[in-house]
């Protein structure tokens, strides 16, 4: 069996054997370093030099007893200009190597430090440089093939029990059509890349991405042992992986390691190491690990910048060199939250009140890479702020919780920024009843409206606002308020216009499908105990799921956008459901509008197809039923004849009682019955 | 067309017309029969269908008028939960099996205790043979004894009754309960099912194990209930694996499987229409974690042939432990963990269900 065959077989069985091969063979010399470019000294000075070297390296790690060995030329008794140092652990050796490489002992002696294990490799480097062989270009698979599905269906991935499965959502067949299924595909969870090209799985050795034209093959692996979390850049050029290790001493912060990979080449572009505090700002996330995602990517497809928030600093990196912009972080005292515009490289940040209210809280917009502050607003007696960007980066809503005069309670309002307008005007919005608690807020994707759930549980109100109405282009205005709804979460369709007002958790999965254009409810439904709601990327269907946080009812239901239940799949131990995202359409906005107007022309074709399928289905259904009925009839016939055969024996058992008489007794009989009630004779006189 | 039903105790039936769901509600008012103080365990109609016998974890089996739900009388004498009962063909004798380690024979009319079969372990199920001359009784494993199936001869005259077993069958795994054992056609076989998920057919003469259900197609978890057709040709089993299965009684061929979302505690087959009913619910410990709206305590109706759910009857506020159809198929009753027996007379809509 050739290696290729083994590979194929392993892939079929879902075994990742090749990864095991990579784990390095431990030579046991991993804790030894070789220090070069030491001075060459005679015997008399040997001890002095040894002392100096020991002193240097004792600062960097614990040298094993007799762990320093400086060879001496047996003839001249002179040292050879290098030494071996054995540390207690490979980590210390690695650290010592990194820190002391290039150490200047004096002008002419600059240390060159290598790991002992690397020597073989370095020795094998050929003297002559050979130009690398140019490999012929092999076109790769079409990773976007799923978009060309004839029936224009969407894919979704689910995890239940040990299995991870990818399906087509086939609403015509009212059932999911399997694409790929694998037990133990991932060791924790799976995630689609933002444009849907890749599915990333997590393993002990690192992360892997899967994709391909027809089925899911492994495209690339990213080595990062014990990876816990992953995140893609929005243009899916880079993959960020995260690993944190609990400290052995519970008082220490846990160690965090983050790596940034180039998705296509698999090359690690940069890694960040440190304690958890460096990747978070104090908060409760600081102990267990950093708040994810640590690195927030600037909007847009370019994947140019990413930012990290830590105490009093914002570090913005650019991806050309993977270093800080202007080589330094931005100092912002006490900053607690940052948020990128989803489309531009504009960063919004929030600084809370300081000095007991002497210094007001601040929300600011900063242009990157220039770091110019575009707009800022000072806010007084603020307890907290939350920033919500609209998906096309046109508006920013800041929910501001302010203290009342007594400081005992808070009330909420909104500051609305119009990013795309001159000077970025800010508008203040307060709810009709400004004491209402705000339960949820959501922008209409790509739109100018937003929805707010406010008021008191258990029957809060839902209000819709628009940033520009026909009468009022420059001001926000309220469209409607729906009173007393059983809702605590909002789910806009990705195309806007429709929204699901959902009552999760305490409301046990109430769903209201609402049309915001017409301001009318299309349907109300319930998915009992639903925990998750997710629209498909086209806004045609929506999935509601009960995940394994509940013991019962696990599974998911697919609905149409207007609230008609299409099908339900029950799966025990249901963990995750995720629609495969679609990249944005290449059509211009005008073209899309044109299609929307002439939709009838296109829909005819699909309606015809729909009808064909439903005819076929009912035909199949009829045939199946017929077959089942016939099979059953056969059984019944057989039972009847056997029963007849045994009749005598049964009679004898019952002491001759004719036992089967009653069995006909309950057969339904239609009896026509005519009764003559009365007869009267009447003589009709001829006139 | 949807007729909304205000009465939460109504019967809900989905009319499946190829692909469109339609719900047809019928306003069937059940009769609530409150007589037991503990969860119900078993229900059985007599052959004429005028009497309904109920067993519960309290110690007194009760007989009711199957027509209006009026209580006719009780059978006092057991000192433990009563698990099962059976009525002779002529409705003169009642046999009950109880956790007090006895099975008792009663005179149905007078309520008089006629005989007590003593075992060293709780009696789990009882069943009269076709001729009422034999009874099969299963016992649980208990200190020193393993679960077993006993065949007793039932004397014509109670004076002549003896307690000796004609035949004793030992289950292969004596630690697992045998939840039900019934007579096969012509008393030639005994069919048993229990906690080890296997269905076994035994020779009633020799005690030889004739057939055992295939592990591949059979139940995966404990079998809780077993109900046979009137002509002894097939039977239905319910299991904790959330399915009910229909088997040929002679060949032990699996014919149908009905899948539901909760463990099945009780099953029944309509003698009139091609309907099977499954009742169940989760363990008592998990009951408080779900809402009654979850529909877990519904008696679910399935089309026998198509294996599709056609409707359900809500009402119990605990798992359903017992189900029985009246012999004419025009009413059925359910008994729940909540201690109630609910007696339903079907209305005309039920008989017009199209699927």
Image: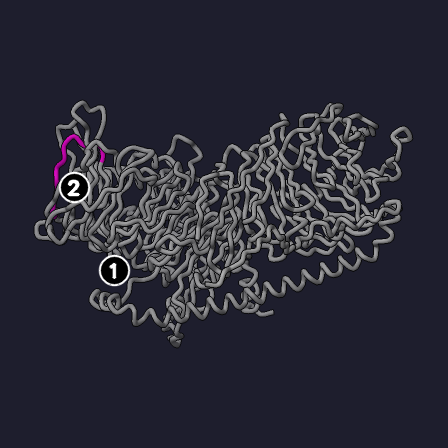
Query: Is residue B249 one of those drawn in magenta?
Result: no
Q: Which residues are magenta?
A: A374-384
From where the camera sits, is residue A207 visible?
A: no
Viewport quadrant of the C terminus of chain B: bottom right
Horizontally, residue B25 falls left or right of residue B123, namely: left
Q: Which mark is residue A31?
A: none
Report whether residue B234 is seen: yes
Q: Residue A415, which numbered label?
A: 2
Q: How many neighbours does mark 1 have within 10 angstroms: few (below 14), some (14-19), or many (20 or more)?
A: some
Q: Secondary structure at mark 1?
A: loop
Q: Chain of mark 2?
A: A
A508 is higher (above) or lower (below) than A419: above
Residue sitting farthest toward the bottom:
A136
Q: Which residue is mark 1?
A: A302
Main SS class of the magenta portion in the image? strand
Q: Is residue A235 above or below residue A467?
A: below
x then y, percent, for residue B337 = 60, 32
Q: Is residue A9 left or right of residue A419?
A: right
Quadrant position of residue A437: top left
- The image position of residue A65, as x and y in percent, is 47, 38
Which secondary structure lies at badge 2? strand
Is disc 2 surrounded by few (<14), some (14 to 19) or many (20+) residues within 10 Å? many
Going from N to C along the chain, the mark reached first, 1 or 2, is: 1
Q: Residue at x 68, y 61 (%)?
A: A633
- What colour scheme governs how the chains and residues are painted in the rendered image of this protein? one colour
Query: On the rendered structure, is A218 left or right of A355?
Result: right
A74 or A195, which is in the foreground? A195
What residue is shown at x 88% (from left), y 47% (from top)?
A: A656
Q: Nearer the viewer, residue B89 or A487?
A: B89
Q: Nearer the viewer, residue A172 or A332?
A: A172
């Amino acid at each position: 069996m050739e290696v290729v065959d083994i590979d194929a077989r392993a892939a079929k069985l879902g075994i990742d054997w090749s990864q095991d091969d990579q784990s390095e063979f431990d030579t046991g010399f991993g804790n030894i370093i070789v220090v070069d470019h030491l001075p060459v000294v005679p015997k008399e000075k040997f001890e002095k030099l040894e002392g100096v070297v020991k002193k240097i390296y004792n600062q960097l790690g614990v040298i094993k007893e007799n762990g320093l060995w400086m060879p001496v030329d047996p003839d001249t008794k002179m040292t050879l200009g290098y030494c071996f140092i054995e540390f207690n652990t490979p980590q210390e050796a690695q650290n010592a190597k990194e820190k002391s490489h290039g150490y200047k002992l004096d002008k002419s002696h600059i240390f060159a430090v290598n790991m002992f294990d690397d020597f073989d490799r370095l020795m094998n480097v050929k003297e002559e440089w050979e130009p690398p062989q140019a490999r012929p270009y092999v076109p790769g698979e079409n990773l976007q093939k799923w978009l060309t599905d004839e029936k224009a269906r969407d894919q979704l991935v689910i995890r239940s029990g040990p299995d991870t499965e990818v399906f087509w959502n086939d609403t015509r067949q009212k059932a999911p059509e399997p694409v790929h299924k694998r037990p133990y595909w991932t060791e924790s969870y799976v995630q689609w890349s933002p444009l849907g090209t890749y599915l990333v799985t997590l393993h002990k050795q690192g992360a892997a991405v899967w994709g391909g034209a027809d089925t899911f093959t492994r495209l690339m692996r990213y080595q990062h042992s014990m990876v816990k979390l992953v995140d893609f850049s929005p243009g899916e050029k880079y993959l960020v992986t995260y690993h944190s290790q609990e400290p052995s001493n519970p008082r220490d912060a846990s160690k965090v390691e983050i790596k940034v990979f180039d998705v296509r080449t698999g090359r690690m572009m940069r890694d960040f190491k440190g304690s958890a505090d460096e990747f978070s700002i104090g908060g409760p996330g600081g102990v267990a690990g950093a708040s994810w995602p640590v690195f927030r990517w600037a909007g847009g497809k370019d994947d140019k910048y990413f930012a990290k928030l830590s105490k009093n600093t914002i570090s913005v990196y650019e991806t050309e060199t993977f270093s800080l912009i202007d080589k330094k972080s931005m100092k912002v005292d006490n900053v607690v939250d940052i948020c990128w515009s989803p489309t531009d490289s504009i960063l919004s940040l929030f600084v809370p009140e300081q000095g007991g209210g002497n210094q007001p809280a601040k929300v600011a917009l900063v242009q990157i890479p220039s770091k110019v502050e575009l707009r800022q607003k000072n806010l007084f007696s603020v307890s907290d702020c939350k920033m919500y960007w609209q998906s096309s980066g046109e508006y920013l809503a800041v929910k501001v919780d302010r203290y009342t005069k007594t400081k005992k309670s808070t009330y909420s309002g909104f500051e609305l920024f119009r990013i795309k307008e001159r000077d970025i005007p800010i508008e203040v919005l307060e709810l009709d009843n400004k004491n209402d608690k705000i339960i949820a807020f959501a922008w209409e994707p790509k739109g100018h409206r937003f929805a707010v759930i406010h008021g008191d549980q258990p029957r809060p109100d839902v209000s819709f606002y628009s940033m520009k109405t026909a009468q009022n282009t420059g001001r926000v205005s309220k469209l409607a308020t729906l009173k007393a709804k059983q809702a605590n979460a909002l789910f806009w369709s990705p195309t806007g216009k429709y929204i699901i007002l959902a009552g999760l958790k305490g409301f046990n999965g109430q769903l209201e499908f609402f049309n915001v254009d017409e301001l009318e409810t299309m349907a109300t439904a319930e998915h009992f105990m639903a925990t998750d709601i997710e629209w498909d990327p086209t806004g045609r269907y929506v999935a509601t799921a009960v995940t394994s946080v509940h013991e019962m009812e696990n599974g998911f239901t697919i609905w149409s956008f207007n609230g008609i239940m299409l099908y339900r799949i029950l799966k025990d131990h249901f963990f995750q459901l995720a629609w495969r995202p679609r990249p944005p359409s290449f059509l211009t906005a005008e073209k899309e509008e044109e299609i929307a107007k002439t939709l009838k022309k296109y829909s005819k074709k699909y309606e015809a197809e729909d009808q064909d399928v439903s005819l076929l289905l009912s035909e199949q259904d009829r045939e199946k039923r017929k077959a089942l009925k016939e099979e059953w009839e056969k059984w019944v016939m057989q039972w009847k004849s056997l029963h007849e055969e045994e009749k005598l024996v049964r009679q004898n058992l019952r002491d001759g009682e004719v036992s089967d008489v009653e069995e006909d007794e309950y057969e339904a009989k239609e009896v026509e019955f005519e009764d003559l009630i009365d007869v009267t004779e009447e003589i009709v006189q001829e006139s | 067309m949807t007729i909304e039903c205000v009465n939460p105790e109504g019967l809900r039936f989905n009319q499946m017309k190829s692909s469109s769901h339609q719900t047809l509600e019928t306003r069937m008012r059940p009769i609530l029969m409150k007589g037991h103080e503990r969860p119900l365990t078993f229900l059985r109609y007599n052959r004429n269908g005028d009497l309904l016998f109920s067993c519960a974890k309290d110690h007194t089996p009760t007989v009711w008028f199957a027509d209006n739900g009026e209580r006719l009388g009780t059978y006092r004498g057991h000192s433990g939960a009563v698990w099962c009962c059976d009525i002779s063909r002529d409705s003169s004798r009642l046999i009950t099996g109880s956790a007090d380690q006895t099975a008792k024979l009663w005179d149905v009319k007078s309520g008089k205790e006629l005989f007590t079969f003593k075992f060293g372990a709780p009696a789990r199920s009882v069943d009269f043979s076709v001729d009422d001359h034999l009874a099969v009784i299963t016992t649980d494993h208990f200190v020193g004894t393993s679960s077993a199936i006993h065949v007793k001869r039932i004397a014509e005259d109670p004076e002549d009754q003896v307690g000796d077993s004609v035949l004793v069958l030992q289950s292969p795994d004596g630690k697992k309960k045998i939840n039900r054992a019934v007579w096969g056609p012509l008393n030639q076989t005994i069919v048993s099912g229990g906690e080890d998920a296997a269905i076994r057919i035994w020779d009633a003469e020799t005690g030889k194990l004739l057939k055992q259900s295939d592990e591949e197609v059979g139940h995966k978890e404990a079998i809780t209930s077993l109900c046979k057709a009137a002509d002894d040709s097939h039977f239905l089993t319910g299991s904790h694996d959330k399915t009910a299965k229909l088997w040929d009684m002679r060949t032990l061929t699996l014919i149908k499987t009905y899948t539901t979302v909760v463990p099945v505690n009780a099953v029944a087959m309509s003698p009139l229409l091609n309907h099977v009913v499954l009742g169940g619910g989760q363990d008592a410990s998990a009951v408080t974690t779900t809402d009654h709206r979850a529909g877990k305590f519904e008696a679910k109706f399935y089309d026998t042939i198509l294996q599709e759910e056609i409707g359900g009857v809500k009402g119990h506020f605990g798992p359903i432990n017992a189900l029985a159809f009246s012999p004419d198929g025009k009413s059925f009753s359910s008994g729940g963990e909540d201690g109630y027996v609910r007696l339903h007379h079907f209305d005309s809509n039920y008989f017009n269900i199209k699927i």
